[in-house]
Image (cartoon, rainbow, N blue to C red):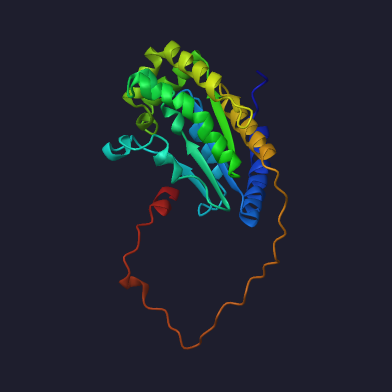
Amino acid sequence: MGSKLTRQVYEEELERLQVELVKMQEWIRETGARVAVVFEGRDAAGKGGTISRITQHLNPRFARTVALPAPSEQEQSQWYFQRYVSHLPAAGELVLFDRSWYNRAGVEHVMGFCTPEQYERFLRQCPTFERMLVEDGILLIKYWFSVSDEEQERRFQRRITDPLKRWKLSPVDLASRERWVEYSRAKDAMFAHTDIPECRWHVVEGDSKRNARINCLAHLLSMVAYQSVSQPPVGLPTRQVDGEYVRPPQEGYAHVPDRAAALAG
């Protein structure tokens, strides 16, 4: 693993990459491309922070993050992949899956939320499902975020004591510490079955959040053969003027208290 980026270098490169992401999105919209990106990995490996940096400056109408809750009783009775199909990108869309159908190969399998038969069926069907998506023209990109045992423990400890991050710790997350080796074996089996030539897994080393974000954003841009889309020139129109308009008295409105002014002293 290389040296950790300084904050200044990180922020400068992040801004540059985010400008390119905006260009990429404009190309996706212009060409009608369909791009789906899967983010999987260890708990606290940095998936959420990376997704946030990708979407930070994108148009949310055309860049969606999908983070599905536990399946309902009705969804449990459906074909396993069915609940994910409706979230796949339409023309001109970028969809980021914050965890995906690979829940079955990881948490569901390790925690006993699915039967052995359902797990084996998933491993057989998943490559076929993904080949169908790629054959239909969807650009499917898969990332696995890796984090060391020691770094994951540090991040979990910070979440326990930080009121802004405590919500990120679920009982399943805590159980992942106890079942570290079981999750490792599940990941190895998942890679063995689903790291297919049509759609490879790309591993992101996540011990340094800054490095992981820069590496992932740069790689994502390299995976989409986008080009700059020419934009028509934009000019600010002259503001409408109406000499007869009189603004109503502001005292009649319910204003938000100026807390900032009080803090500024």
Give whichever of 38, 174 is nearer the camera: 38
Q: Quadrant of residue 180?
A: top left
**Which residue is painted at 45% across and 45% down in the image?**
87
Place residue 261 in its image quadrant: bottom left
Q: Residue furthest bottom?
A: 244
Q: Position of residue 85 (x, y in %)?
A: 45, 43
Snapshot quadrant of residue 169: top left
Q: Is residue 153 above or below residue 39?
A: above
Horizontal and vertical percent position of residue 182 = 42, 13
| Residue 8 visible, this angle | no
Where is residue 62 drawn, in percent x and y? 53, 52
| Along the line of sight, the residue nearer the viewer: 126 or 235 | 126
Residue drawn at x 64%, y 39% as measured from the top left: 14
Q: Residue furthest top?
A: 181
Q: Is residue 77 above or below residue 29?
A: above
x and y percentages locating residue 65 in the rendered image? 48, 43
**Between residues 178 and 121, which one lies in front from this camera angle?**
121
Position above or below: 73 against 259: above
Q: Give the residue displayed 39% in from the left and 41% down from the top.
A: 83
